[in-house]
Amino acid sequence: MSSTQDDLDGFTNNLEEEFDLEEHDKKINGMFGDDYYDVEDIYHGFRSKEEGDLEKTNFDKENELLDSGKEGFKLAHERVALASTILSGKGPWCVARAEATREALQANIDYVCGFVGGACGAIQEGESCYSTDIVRQASYPMNAYFYYYGPTEMNCDFNGTGIIITFDPSHGNCVYPSRNMLD
């Protein structure tokens, strides 16, 4: 391993050891107060407190999908990397796992086409994203669903048949939507 890599590993390990989550939360709360995480922020203005009892969104499913045995700085780094990729406007993309069964991927296509109908026009025979390869055929609508409902781990799970990638899966004239295409 290079000395640069050793230095980086040492820095990461020291940072992880020195980071006190409780102290961090106290400082953030002191700077912004309890109102910083106001429940209306979660609903993007579609509902107000007067329209009923609102609770903060439960992200347990996303946290469970992201956790996979990682802790501390490594887990935080993965979450920041995913968020920054989304905000850059260059991905990420949700695609079908190569090992998924044909039946499961066809079920994904049927499900997504029922909710995000426009996503399926591009995969019809003769269109730019049509493919006889079921993985490619399912990936396009799965990615459209991922962005339509919000690019979260949960919206790419598809019962374990989806995976988030950071390289553009577009091919030929088939361009996969990413954040910058939906703004």
Image (cartoon, helix red, strand yellow):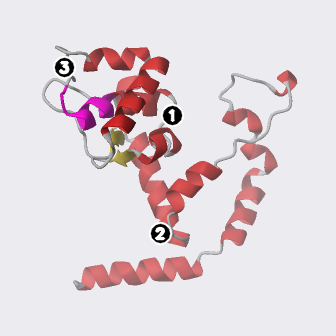
Tell me the quarter of the picture where residue 138 sits.
top left
Give the labeled residue for mark 3.
128
From this viewpoint, is residue 91 visible? no
Q: Which residues are magenta?
A: 131-140
72 up-or-down from 14: above or below:
above
- Which element carries disc 2, helix, strand or loop? helix
| Label placed on residue 74 | 2
Gap in angstroms between the C-alphas marked 3 and 2: 39 Å
Q: Position of residue 159 (x, y in %)?
A: 48, 44
Q: Quadrant of residue 169?
A: top left
Question: In the picture provided, is 118 more to the left or to the right than 76?
Answer: left
Q: Nearer the viewer, residue 22 or 102?
A: 102
The answer to the question of whether label 3 and label 1 lie on touching residues, with beta carbons closer than 8 A, is no
| Disc with the residue nearer the chain's start (2 vs 1) | 2
| Mark 3 or mark 2: whose residue is earlier in sequence | 2
Q: Secondary structure at mark 3?
A: loop
Q: Residues within 10 Å of mark 3 (few under 14, many from 20)?
A: some
Q: Earlier in the sequence, mark 3 or mark 1?
A: 3
Is the residue 11 above or below the residue 35 in the image?
below
Total count of labels? 3
Residue 64 is covered by the magenta coloring: no
Q: Which residue is mark 1?
A: 150
Which amino acid type is shown beneath numbered disc 1? Answer: Gly
Residue 47 numbered tag: none
From what the image shows, is residue 23 above or below residue 146?
Answer: below
Q: Is residue 36 left or right of residue 76?
A: right
Badge 2: residue crowd in 10 Å (few <14, some 14–19, many ≥20): some
| Quadrant where the image shows the C terminus | top left
Callout in the foreground (3, 1): 3
